[in-house]
Every structure is written in structure tokens, then in C-alpha cells.
Image (cartoon, helix red, strand yellow):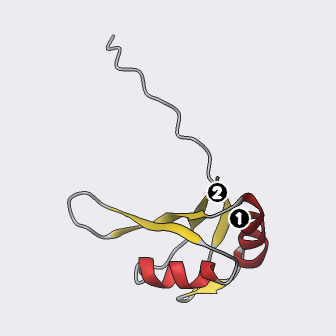
Amino acid sequence: MGKKLYVGNLSYSTTEGSLRNLFQAYGNVASAKIITDRDSGVSKGFGFVEMGSDDEANAAINGTNGVDLDGRQIKVNEAMDKPRRSNDRY
């Protein structure tokens, strides 16, 4: 199974296609998603790329972290699981 990568400091003009193209040089890209604002649809400046294997993910981290993409120096690292919020109300 692959690894999900966090990609930060994205330009607002970066597309999911350009993100996918950058990472394809390091292996199979299972998915590429830029996170957008729910109401306006504008990029929030970060996204996630899922690589096909752990080795491909590690190569992608080493090869893309700090690279200039659309005029911004991107930050790439392994995505962490989002902590679950409790539905308990006080």
C-alpha cells in the first residue's frame, strides 16, 4: 500500500494536474488533491498526494521538498492522520 504525502505552501494557481505531473517523476501517483475552501472554492494552499508504494513516497519526498512549483517553494512530508474530534458537547 502507498503512502499519503502532505504538500504545503502551494501557490493558489497550482492545479491538481500540475501537482500530479511533478510527483509522477517519482512513481505511480494514486491520487492528487488540492484542498479548497468549501464556500469559495479557492485553494487553501496545501494538498495531498498518495504514492503507489512507500519507496516511491520516500523518493518523492526527497525529490520534491523545497522545489519551486508555480513560484512557491513547496514543503513535502508524510501526512499525519487527523486526530478524531469527539462529538461530546460540554
- For the C terminus, the quadrant is top left
Question: What residue is shown with label 2?
Answer: 2
Q: Quadrant of residue 34?
A: bottom left
Residue at 65% x, 68% y is 75
Image quadrant of residue 67? bottom right
Instruction: Look at 30% across and 70% down and name the residue there.
Output: 42
Q: Position of residue 30 (x, y in %)?
A: 53, 66
- Per the image, label 2 sits on a secondary structure element best described as loop
- State the image coordinates of residue 65 (x, y, percent, origin top left): 72, 73
Q: Quadrant of residue 35?
A: bottom left
Q: Is residue 57 above or below residue 90?
A: below
x and y percent of residue 72 in the render?
58, 82
Circles 2 and 1, Cβ within 8 Å, touching? The answer is yes
Categorize mark 1 by other alpha carbons within 10 Å: few (<14), some (14-19), many (20+). many
Q: Which residue, given by chain and number where applicable, does mark 1 sit on?
A: 57
Earlier along the polypeptide chain: callout 2 or callout 1?
2
Mark 2, Cα crowd under 10 Å, few <14 / some 14-19 / many 20+, is some
Q: Quick check: 69 left or right of 36? A: right
Query: Which residue is nearer to you in this view: 83 or 17?
Result: 17
Q: Residue at x 52, y 88 (%)?
A: 70
Which residue appears at 44% of the width and 82% of the height? 17
**C-alpha gap between disc 2 and disc 1:** 7 Å
Q: In the current view of this chain or complex, which residue is farthest to the left?
A: 39
Q: Is residue 13 above or below residue 85?
A: below
Q: Which residue ends up furthest to the top in the rendered image?
A: 90
The answer to which of 29 and 60 lies nearer the viewer is: 29
Q: Nearer the viewer, mark 2 or mark 1?
A: 2
Which amino acid type corresponds to the residue marked 2 in the rendered image? Answer: Gly
